């Protein structure tokens, strides 16, 4: 089983599976009000948990219900409708993502947003992922404002292809231009591709 300690980092795939199972378990808890320990035991019995970050699964599954009112206080101002109007899946995803934003600072906010969107694509209504994306992005700006505002070297230059031309040092020489003037040449040569 993929149990991770504080020094060992779980794979992204193990975390993704943990999130997916945690979402399903939180949804089940939300809809049926069943005991969390019973839900967790059922998931561990009924599913192949060998490639799941079990500590992450446990943390989210127990953390979301424990922090429910605090999470909803963060989510509600970002909504354009009442929480009762959200589908149970969307609400569960928003709670899970908000919990990660607050309590799992080891996960970059962009990863939290992306994973929430992917969960909404897999389990939510058509185009629900767009709504989830907008809400979780607003939550990130509120909860992780320093991280959001900080430029990231990886994303800062995304899309900009960096091209470097080889430069060679050459001795300077007197060069005659087309108009007949003589000038000193630069002592570098840049090769164009």
Image (tube, rainbow, N blue to C red):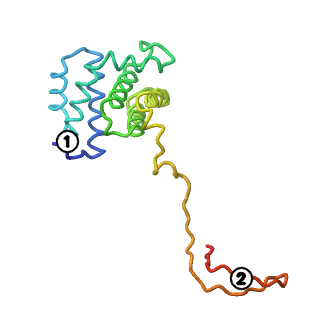
| Crowd band around label 1 with a 10 angstrom C-alpha radius: few (<14), some (14–19), many (20+) | few
Q: Where is residue 93 in the image (x, y as percent from the top left)?
A: 37, 27
Task: Name the quarter where the C terminus is drawn.
Answer: bottom right
**141 shown above or below 160:** above
Mark number for residue 184?
Answer: 2
Mark number for residue 6?
Answer: 1
The answer to whether the residues at label 2 and label 1 have Cβ atoms under 8 Å apart is: no
Residue in the image at 42% along x and 34% along y: 117
* Count of numbered tags: 2
Where, by quadrant of the figure, is residue 14 drawn?
top left
Mark number for residue 97?
Answer: none
Where, by quadrant of the figure, is residue 42 drawn?
top left
| Crowd band around label 2 with a 10 angstrom C-alpha radius: few (<14), some (14–19), many (20+) | few
Q: Position of residue 192 (x, y in %)?
A: 63, 74
Residue in the image at 55% along x and 59% along y: 161
Task: Name the quarter where the N terminus is drawn.
Answer: top left
Q: Where is residue 163 in the image (x, y as percent from the top left)?
A: 56, 65
Q: Position of residue 34 (x, y in %)?
A: 21, 16
Secondary structure beneath disc 2? strand
Where, by quadrant of the figure, is residue 102 drawn?
top left
**73 shown above or below 43:** above
Question: Does the rendering let one see residue 132?
Answer: yes
Q: Is 77 in front, or is 50?
A: 77
């Amino acid at each position: 089983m993929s149990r991770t300690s504080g020094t060992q980092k779980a794979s992204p795939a193990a975390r993704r599976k943990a999130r997916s199972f945690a979402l399903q378990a939180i949804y089940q808890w939300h809809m049926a009000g069943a005991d969390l320990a019973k839900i967790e035991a059922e998931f561990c019995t009924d599913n192949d948990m060998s490639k799941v970050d079990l500590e992450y699964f446990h943390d989210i599954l127990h953390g979301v219900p424990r922090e429910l009112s605090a999470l909803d206080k963060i989510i509600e101002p970002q909504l354009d409708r009442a929480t009762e109007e959200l589908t149970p899946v969307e609400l569960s995803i928003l709670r899970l993502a908000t919990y990660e934003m607050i309590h799992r600072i080891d996960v970059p906010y962009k990863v939290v947003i992306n994973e929430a969107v992917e969960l909404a694509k897999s389990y939510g209504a058509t185009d629900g992922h767009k709504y989830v994306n907008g809400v979780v992005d607003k939550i990130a700006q509120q909860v992780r404002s320093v991280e959001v505002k900080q430029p990231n070297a990886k994303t800062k230059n995304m899309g900009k292809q960096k091209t470097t031309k080889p430069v060679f040092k050459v001795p300077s020489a007197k060069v005659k231009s087309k108009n007949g003037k003589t000038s000193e040449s630069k002592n570098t040569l840049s090769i164009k591709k």
